Amino acid sequence: MPEKVVIIGSGPAAWTAAIYAARANLGPLVYEGAVTNENREKGTLPLGQLALTTEVENYPGTPAGDTREYLRSALPPDRQPFWVQTNLPQPSHGLNGPELMDLMRQQSLNFGTRIITDDIVRVDFNKHPFALNALEGQTVETLSVIIATGARANYLGLASEDRFKNLGVSACAVCDGALPRFRNKPLVAIGGGDSAVEESTYLTQFASVVHLVHRRDQLRAS
């Protein structure tokens, strides 16, 4: 029997879709992505971009507070953050990105979502039911597909970027520009398109000066 719905992805959109589909008794199957070195290098491991950030301040419902007991009671032991498992001090004033994503994942599981930790590498939408092929060789047929693979930041590919992510290197000015580590400091934005110019303009509210570095003799931004 084909699946009723398969969801590809594991960010907020994917888990929201899974929660709604599960509550509607559709028995969703989620392919959350594979844990591979390639995905690690590209920043596309399961749980999406939020899993790569620290404290979440701009998502509704995540106020500052003591989250230890909530995380301990809401998540199974193997999914609890390391500081809960090892009884270390809470690292921030509220929820961190990976914790928020694990809570979304667990909420979908609570309603009966099934999860496979693998990548979908090929799809055939020319026939129905649709056929999906996974990285590890599994083939699944489904009546409907929700593609919620999200996006990823377009980094330069420097070795130092990984070392300084969340320590001075950011891919989101709106998310991070107001943080103390950036405020009243000289900042550099790299790129010449609309996103780069918009991010640079936003950063002028906080930086002492913003340098826009681009590779052409004129900006591509509109």
Image (cartoon, rainbow, N blue to C red):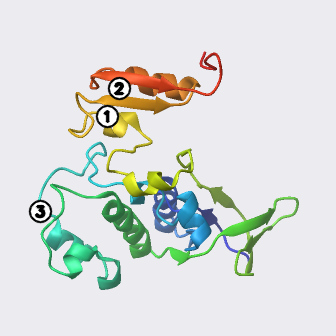
Work out which quarter of the rendered image holds the N terminus and state it. bottom right
* Residue position for label 1: 177
What secondary structure is found at the residue carrying circle 1? Answer: loop
Distance of mark 2 from mark 1, alpha carbons? 6 Å
* Residue position for label 2: 203
Q: Which mark is residue 97?
A: none
What secondary structure is found at the residue carrying circle 3? Answer: loop
* Residue position for label 3: 66
Q: Residues within 10 Å of mark 3 (few under 14, many from 20)?
A: few
Distance of mark 3 from mark 1, alpha carbons? 25 Å
Q: Amino acid at mark 3?
A: Asp
Q: Is 15 left, or right, of 219 in this rendering?
A: left
Q: Residue at x 52, y 28 (%)?
A: 195
Q: Residue at x 62, y 63 (%)?
A: 8
Mark 2 touching mark 1, by CB under 8 A?
yes
Q: Amino acid at mark 1?
A: Gly
Residue 122, position as x, y percentages in the image? 78, 66
Name the foreground residue: 210 vs 204.
210
Q: Is 105 left, or right, of 90 in this rendering?
A: right
Q: Amino acid at mark 2?
A: Leu
Looking at the picture, does residue 76 appear above or below residue 203? below
Distance of mark 3 from mark 2, alpha carbons? 31 Å
